[in-house]
Image (cartoon, helix red, strand yellow):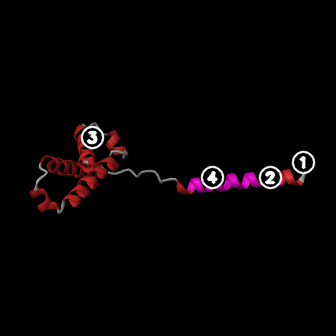
C-alpha cells in the first residue's frame, strides 16, 4: 500500500473516531430513578397543569386575564403548562404508571388548540 492510500485510511479512521467522540459527548445521561413520593408529586403537578389549562379554555373571559395577565400572557401560561405535560409524558415513571393518561392527553390537545387559536 502506498503512502497516499495509508494517509487516506488514517484520515478516515481519525474522522470516525472524532464523530464517535462527539456522539458520545452529546448522549444524555440515563434518567435517574425517583421515589414513589416524587412520582406522586410529579403527577400532582401534572394535575395542576391539567386544571389550569381546562379552566382557562373553559372560561376565556376577562376574569382569566385579570388573574393571569393580558391575553398573550394567558396563552403563554397555557403553552408552558402544555409543554410541561408533554415533557413529563416522556419520563419512564409516566410510561410505567397504570394511571389513566386521558386527562393529560386531552389537556395537551386542548392546550395546543387554545394556543394556536
Cα distance between the residues tagged 1 and 3: 61 Å
The answer for how far apart the CA atoms under marks 2 and 3 are is: 53 Å
Q: Is residue 12 magenta?
A: yes
Q: Position of residue 62 (x, y in %)?
A: 10, 57
Q: Quadrant of residue 11?
A: bottom right
Q: Earlier in the sequence, mark 1 or mark 2?
A: 1
Q: Residue at x 26, y 38 (%)?
A: 101
On the image, numbered disc 2 is attached to which residue?
8
View extreme (left): residue: 63
Residue in the image at 79% along x and 50% along y:
9
Name the disc covering residue 105, or none: 3
| SS of the residue under disc 3 | helix
Q: Are marks 3 and 4 in contact (CB under 8 Å)?
A: no
For the residues labelled 1 and 4, the Cα–Cα distance comes to: 27 Å
Which sits earlier in the primary sequence, circle 1 or circle 4? 1
Q: Residue at left 9%, top 57%?
A: 63
Magenta run includes residue 8: yes
Q: CA distance from mark 1 to mark 2?
A: 11 Å
Q: Mark 2 or mark 3: which comes first in sequence?
A: 2
| Mark 3 or 4, nearer chain start | 4
Tell me where residue 36 appears, x and y as whole percent.
28, 48
The residue where tag 4 is placed is 20
Front in this rendered view, residue 61 or 27:
61
Q: Residue at x 37, y 44 (%)?
A: 92
Where does the magenta region start and end?
7-24
Amino acid at each position: 500500500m502506498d503512502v497516499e492510500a495509508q494517509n487516506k485510511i488514517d484520515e478516515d479512521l481519525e474522522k470516525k473516531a472524532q464523530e464517535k467522540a462527539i456522539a458520545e459527548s452529546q448522549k444524555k445521561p440515563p434518567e435517574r430513578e425517583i421515589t414513589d413520593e416524587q412520582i406522586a408529586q410529579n403527577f400532582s403537578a401534572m394535575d395542576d397543569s391539567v386544571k389550569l389549562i381546562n379552566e382557562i379554555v373553559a372560561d376565556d373571559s376577562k376574569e382569566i386575564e385579570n388573574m393571569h395577565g393580558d391575553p398573550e400572557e394567558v396563552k403563554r401560561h397555557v403553552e408552558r403548562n402544555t409543554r410541561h405535560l408533554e415533557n413529563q409524558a416522556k419520563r419512564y415513571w409516566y410510561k410505567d404508571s397504570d394511571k389513566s393518561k386521558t386527562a393529560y392527553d386531552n389537556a395537551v390537545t386542548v392546550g395546543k388548540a387554545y394556543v394556536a387559536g
